[in-house]
Image (cartoon, rainbow, N blue to C red):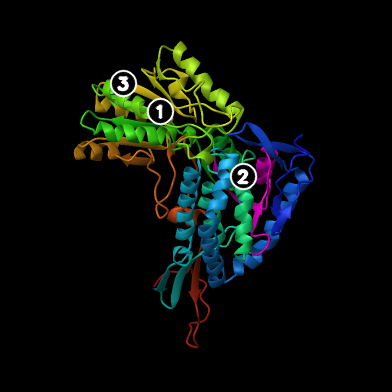
Amino acid sequence: MTAMTMPAVSHWIDGKPRPGTGGRFGPIFDPALGRQVRSVPLAGEAEIAEAIASAAAAFPAWRDASMAKRLTIMFAFRELLNARKAELAELITEEHGKVLSDALGEIARGQEVVEFALGFPHLTKGEYSENVSTGVDVYSLRQPLGVVGVISPFNFPAMVPLWFVPVAIAAGNTVVLKPSEKDPSAAIWIAGLFAEAGLPPGVLTVLHGDKQAVDGLLEHPDVASISFVGSTPIAKYVYETGTRNGKRVQALGGAKNHMLVLPDADLDLVADSAVNAGFGSAGERCMAISVIVAVEPVADVLIEKIAQRMATLRVGDGRRGCDMGPLVTEQHRDKVASYLDIASQDGATIVVDGRGIQVDGDPNGFWLGPTLIDNVPTTSRVYTEEIFGPVLSIVRVASYEQGVALINGNQYGNGTAIFTNDGGAARRFQNEVTVGMIGINVPIPVPVAYFSFGGWKDSLFGDVKAYGAAGFHFFTREKAVTSRWLDPSHGGINLGFPQNA
């Protein structure tokens, strides 16, 4: 079947599925089978305008809805999600390829933000000062922005929307969500669940598409803000285009996350952590560890331990209880695999080659097994570029200072970790390293929901991080009110400049 004759997912507009009418469709694959299973409509100009108009029309009533009503809907959504998350996990595995247990873990981390958002009445409170001048009070309000756009990536088709959408909706905004066209069904499932929870039509809209849909959100005057997660070049484009069009933007970009291993570290813990953080979700995580910075003399022993653990991993269809699934598309698999040739050309040593492995799954799937590369030159593209796949690099350094300098010299500043039993070294590391999220003997330092997620340098464009209190600040704006209620003894006309007294 062609893309147009395949079963197609729908947009979600005005609280119900809306088939695509723009005439353009893209393929959705089951990566473990290597074949197309449905198609996705790619929105044209008319569909983009319709989606934004629906969200704009719904905004005034939702903004004015009582906190009690919003809270009731959010609680109902939380309960529905908890009861039916297995359905969502199956959708994620089918379209993304990650194993079911990992899909459930993704949902759990998204649900943490849903639960945090239930505290929005407290998080959106203003402040009040009485008698700042005689008979004058000043107070602040936090009010929603209006229509907000969310552009989410393929690697977390449920978690990333759940980072932004519940916070934005709880704060009183209406949302247009543009999910990745590679695995869009999770977003439609979430929208349907919100409708079942009682969310009014138009408060959450799902618009499928490619660059045309992204640009439509970035340029439309009725969209007040953009939240984006994806690669750094696109994040920079989103930030520059959105801000040029007068929007508030938080654009989370790519990463090259390092794990600094000191000689006193527990190398068994390090090896377990490196395998878990390097190869979970086939390395398609912005918080994956992709570089181990080994302070000599630990590298040889550590490589042996990592390779032993890699040999036990079962790669295959995520519905069969495997440890690691396929990559999301054939093109992405081939791009990641090409870095192994680059490594060889640049003088690195391929310790474990993930090409051509035996898998527990359909041979047509988009497979690449876990890969370990030693002695990677820091000038090689294997080191300088975000690979976004199951490729773990080893860079050897002579000292702690050299390791920190290497991390701080990298263009990215998303996440990093140090493994050591020296508390002084760990404390020094967290102070000196120029990275936004830090793990100490923790390989994937994704903050819990009541903190906030975001990196430094080329890993974040914009000033405000995702979720947590920062998320509510992003999706609201402060209004200050200076108030005086006159009594019969007021003093009459005075043309002088007002002064506090």
Give the vertical position of 328 relative to 473 (above or below): above
Which comes before the other along the chain, label 1 or label 3? 3
| Secondary structure type for disc 2 | loop
Which label's residue is closer to the chain start, 3 or 2? 2
Relative side of 244 to 497, left or right = right
Write down the region rendered in magenta: 200-229
Q: Residues within 10 Å of mark 1 (few under 14, many from 20)?
A: some
Q: What label does residue 396 carry, if any?
A: 3
CA gap between label 1 and label 2 equals 29 Å
For the point 61% across and 41% down, the residue is 183
Q: Quadrant of the N terminus?
A: top right
Q: Is residue 488 above or below residue 118?
A: below
Q: Is residue 302 magenta?
A: no
**Is residue 434 in view?**
no
Q: Quadrant of the C terminus?
A: bottom left
Foreground tag (1 vs 3) = 3
| Amino acid on which the number 1 mark rests in the picture | Asn
Picture quadrant where residue 97 is located:
top right
Marks 1,3: beta carbons within 8 A: no
Q: Amino acid at mark 2?
A: Pro
The residue labelled by disc 2 is 179
